[in-house]
Image (cartoon, rainbow, N blue to C red):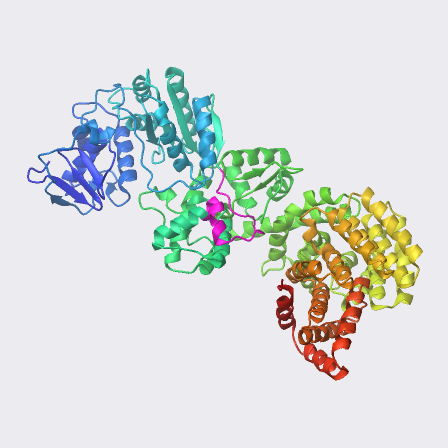
């Protein structure tokens, strides 16, 4: 050491040679004997390059030592100190390059007691090779572990049951942090504590044992590193943590098996992106942090209920000094965490961006790309400093066939099956071979498996998907996307064929999970580099998946886009399905829907199945019935019923019978209408279709309303809603049932029970894009306003609703007619004809937003 210098300061560190201590910001940093000697040798010779031979002679004087020992210790120092401290000059050696100041050591004459030093610093001169290690120590995490209490408990339990536990998970999911917390919790159970060996910086498999030795604080010298480790641990009882094994699996597995066979008192806790597959290994698969489901509204108070948002808030506080989100910010935070799939590294990289942008800007940028996630800890390995590097490291470790499949899988927008993956891969050896590759990718934590449904489904985390897609060439990406759309055409063609005959639950389980892939496929097909003809065909097969998921707006948007691309080359059955989708139960009613039904009928007469033509005919009849043209509706509904009865019982026949029941009720044929509804209900129950059961019961409620039995109507409407699962009860298919119940209650004067139903239905109808239901709920609120004396509001709402009905030219339902009649009666009782006319005229001049705002004032009153 330089004789006049008592200490060296560089960056946040202070190195005191006489005390053999290294401190950072007032806290001692654990550093073992040979690592300390190596650092001191480099610091003292910072004015020059020090060759590997010179360093080995300085640190291991008079000893024959493998060069690998030096490589391991240099890697450990870089991990400890961060980048930009020690430079490698190829073929020459190493140089300490950080700016360094020589300073006097404080209180040099009073060295601290040994008990005050870390155990590694107490070992000023390590013993000979093979000597027992000092009591173990662990790196000290600087941040709180968030959302992992359950994982900690399970890892601890497994460590008490097994001698080898591996924490497996995707890059950035927090394996090291969990392992350190688990080791710190359980180390007191072992007389010799715990040791930590970081395999992350190690590139050569032959250096694994030497790295473990360095972690134990023993010198290998000229001996066999693994034998030295085993000799050091024989007779010891302690926990050995091996961190970052995924790139050294065989060597790590061999070392763990050798240690455990010879050292019965040792337990090993490893971390890796895939299992070691060593004898006796037990796995703990670490999943991303939980976030709220996309459809759950989250308040600021509830952010702490979800580990992902709890971590985001904590890291944002660390970056900003103060961060107190409100309810509006809570939603943005949760969407960010959902976009980042709850990956702790991604969250930790994203939160500091709030120093330069708002939450909304951060969320919008992350929805477009992940380039913001590039500023990690300087002390981390290069491959751990950014999300791109972390995922890229995993991709580089894959076998060629595994990597090729994973890159193609990146075009899926959501989950997928082995069958769809095989189609996309174009694998000549078939689905079995692809299943093997998928299993390997699941093992490597690059693919997430969901085995809870009727068939296994898999997915890539959003960040993995993004960076994998970047590695595909433009031509390969386009080919993979085309293959995805071709697969979806086959899948949804089968879905439409299954829908009339399969139970709702079974059909939903098979085809609803493809919805994100469907969005991705249609977006590409209709995009600038896509295939519009393929997109038109795909869209034509998707009416029921959009409708069953209550995605009415998307149904209308995609079908309108596809219809605009129809040309002479479009097959008539494809065009027919598109027009059919624009005149169903959830389609806007009126002249446009009638025109769509006529087009569908003409196209299916030219080419189409009996079921397709029967569906088109009853929908045309339904539109005529709604407009009051019963003469035109009669022959159509009878032909539809004849065609559909020629096939086996189907949901299409149920719908046709329900449409004919309404037609017959309008024709004043109640007995025939009742018979149609009873048959429809019987078929719906045999087909196990809760949606059709509810709709048919809803029609029966209308039947009671038409005959003036409001009590019976309310009871049957409630039965219809009770027959549904909670999720289905919010669907577009049954909006009118709950709304109709409110109408029946208003007809009986029960405002208190009707008001909350109407408020909920109005919000849902706007979200689902159901304009006729919006208008129906506005009329109901107009009646409440009139009954409570808010005549001006009631008059304006009445005028707006009248205008909408005149524009559409359709009949009201029986429940809606009851509301209308009572509303008009109340207004006429309290207003002169001129006053009513003026208010009505005022309402016709207002738009939906203005009317809804007024209506919500009525809806929100107690």
Query: Where residue 167 sits: x, y (%)?
Result: 45, 32
Residue shown at 23% from the left, 25% from the top: 65
Residue shown at 72% from the left, 43% from the top: 505
| Left or right for 500, reference 161 | right
Residue 339 forms part of the magenta stretch? no
Residue shown at 69% from the left, 77% from the top: 843
Q: Nearer the viewer, residue 177 or 642?
A: 177
Quarter of the image where the C terminus is located: bottom right
Q: Is residue 189 above or below residue 87?
A: above
Q: Nearer the viewer, residue 531 or 186?
A: 186
| Left or right for 778, reference 596 | left
| Left or right for 393, reference 131 | right
Q: Is residue 568 above or below residue 163?
A: below
Query: Where residue 5 sits: x, y (%)?
Result: 9, 40
The quarter holding residue 145 reads: top left
Identify the magenta region: 287-309
Residue that extends furthest to the left in the rendered view of this protein: 4
Q: Main secondary structure of the magenta part?
A: loop
Q: Nearer the viewer, residue 792 or 336?
A: 792
The quarter holding residue 212 reads: top left
Query: Where residue 568 sits: x, y (%)?
Result: 75, 64
Query: Where residue 786 sits: x, y (%)?
Result: 71, 71
Residue shown at 81% from the left, 46% from the top: 684
Q: Is residue 738 visible?
A: yes
């Amino acid at each position: 050491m330089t004789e006049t210098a008592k200490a060296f300061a560089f960056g946040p560190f202070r190195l005191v040679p006489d005390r053999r201590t290294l401190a950072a910001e007032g806290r001692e940093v654990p550093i073992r004997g040979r690592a300390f000697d190596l650092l001191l040798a480099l610091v003292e010779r910072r004015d020059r390059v020090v060759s590997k031979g010179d360093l080995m002679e300085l640190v291991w004087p008079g000893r024959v030592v493998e060069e690998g020992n030096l490589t391991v210790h240099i890697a450990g120092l870089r991990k400890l100190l961060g980048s930009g401290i020690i430079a490698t000059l190829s073929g020459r050696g190493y140089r300490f390059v950080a700016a360094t100041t020589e300073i006097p050591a404080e209180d040099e004459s009073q060295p601290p007691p040994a008990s005050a030093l870390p155990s590694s610093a107490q070992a000023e001169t390590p013993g000979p090779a093979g000597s027992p290690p000092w009591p173990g120590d662990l790196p000290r995490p600087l941040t709180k572990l968030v959302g992992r209490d359950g994982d900690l408990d399970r890892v601890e339990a497994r460590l008490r049951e097994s001698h080898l536990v591996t924490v497996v998970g995707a890059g950035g999911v927090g394996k090291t942090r969990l392992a350190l917390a688990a080791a710190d919790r359980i180390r007191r159970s072992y007389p010799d504590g715990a040791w930590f060996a970081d395999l992350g910086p190690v590139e050569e498999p032959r250096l694994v044992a030497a790295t473990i030795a360095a972690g134990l604080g023993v010198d290998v010298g000229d001996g066999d590193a693994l034998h030295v480790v085993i000799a050091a641990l024989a007779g010891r009882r302690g926990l050995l943590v091996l961190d970052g094994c995924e790139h050294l699996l065989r060597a790590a597995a061999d070392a763990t098996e050798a240690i455990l066979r010879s050292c019965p008192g040792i337990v090993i806790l490893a971390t890796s992106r895939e299992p070691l597959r060593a004898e006796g290994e037990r796995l703990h698969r670490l999943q991303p942090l939980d976030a709220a489901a996309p459809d759950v509204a989250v308040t600021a108070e509830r952010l702490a209920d979800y580990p992902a948002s709890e971590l985001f808030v904590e890291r944002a506080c660390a970056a900003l000094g103060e961060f107190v989100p409100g309810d509006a910010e809570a939603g943005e935070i949760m969407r960010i965490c959902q976009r980042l799939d709850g990956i702790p590294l991604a969250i930790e990289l994203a939160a500091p961006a709030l120093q330069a942008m708002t939450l909304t800007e951060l969320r919008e940028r992350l929805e477009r790309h992940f380039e913001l996630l590039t500023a990690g800890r300087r002390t981390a390995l290069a491959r751990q400093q950014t999300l791109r590097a972390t995922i890229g490291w995993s991709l580089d470790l894959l076998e060629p066939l595994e990597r090729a499949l994973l890159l193609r899988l990146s075009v899926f927008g959501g989950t997928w099956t082995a069958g769809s993956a095989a189609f996309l891969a174009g694998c000549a050896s078939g689905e079995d071979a692809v299943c093997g590759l998928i299993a390997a990718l699941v093992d490597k934590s690059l693919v997430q498996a969901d085995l809870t449904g009727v068939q296994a489904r898999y997915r890539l985390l959003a960040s993995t998907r993004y960076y994998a897609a970047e590695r595909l060439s433009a031509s390969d990406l386009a080919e993979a996307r085309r293959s995805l759309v071709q697969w979806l055409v086959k899948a949804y063609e089968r879905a439409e064929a299954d829908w009339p005959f399969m139970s709702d639950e079974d059909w939903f389980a098979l085809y609803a999970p493809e919805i994100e892939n469907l969005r991705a496929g249609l977006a590409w097909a209709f995009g600038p580099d896509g295939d519009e003809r393929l997109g038109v065909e795909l869209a034509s097969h998707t009416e029921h998946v959009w409708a069953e998921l209550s995605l009415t707006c998307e149904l209308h948007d995609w079908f309108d886009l596809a219809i605009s691309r129809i040309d002479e080359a479009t097959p008539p059955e494809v065009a027919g399905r598109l027009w059919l989708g624009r005149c169903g139960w959830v389609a806007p009613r009126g002249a446009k829907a009638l025109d769509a039904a006529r087009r569908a009928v003409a196209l299916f007469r030219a080419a189409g199945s009996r079921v397709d033509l029967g569906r088109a005919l009853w929908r045309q009849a339904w539109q005529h019935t709604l407009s009051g043209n019963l003469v035109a509706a009669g022959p159509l509904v009878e032909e539809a019923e004849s065609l559909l009865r020629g096939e086996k019982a189907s949901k299409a026949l149920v719908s046709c019978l329900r449409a004919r029941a309404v037609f017959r009720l309008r024709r004043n044929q109640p007995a025939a209408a009742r018979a149609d509804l009873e048959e429809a209900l019987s078929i719906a129950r045999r087909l196990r279709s809760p949606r059709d059961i509810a709709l048919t019961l809803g029609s029966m409620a209308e039947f009671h309303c038409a005959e003036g039995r409001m009590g019976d109507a309310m009871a049957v409407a409630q039965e219809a809603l009770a027959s549904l699962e909670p999720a289905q009860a919010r669907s577009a298919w049954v909006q009118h049932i709950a709304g109709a119940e409110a109408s029946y209650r208003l007809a009986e004067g029960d405002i208190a029970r009707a008001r909350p139903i109407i408020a909920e239905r109005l919000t849902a109808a706007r979200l689902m894009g159901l304009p006729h239901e919006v208008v129906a709920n506005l009329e109901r609120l107009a009646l409440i306003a009139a009954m409570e004396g808010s005549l001006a509001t009631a008059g304006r709402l009445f005028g707006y609703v009248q205008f909408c009905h005149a524009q559409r030219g359709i009949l009201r339902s029986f429940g809606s007619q009851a509301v209308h009649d009572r509303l008009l009666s109340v207004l006429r009782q309290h207003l002169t004809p001129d006053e009513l006319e003026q208010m009505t005229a005022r309402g016709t001049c207002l738009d939906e937003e203005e009317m809804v705002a007024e209506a919500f004032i009525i809806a929100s009153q107690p």
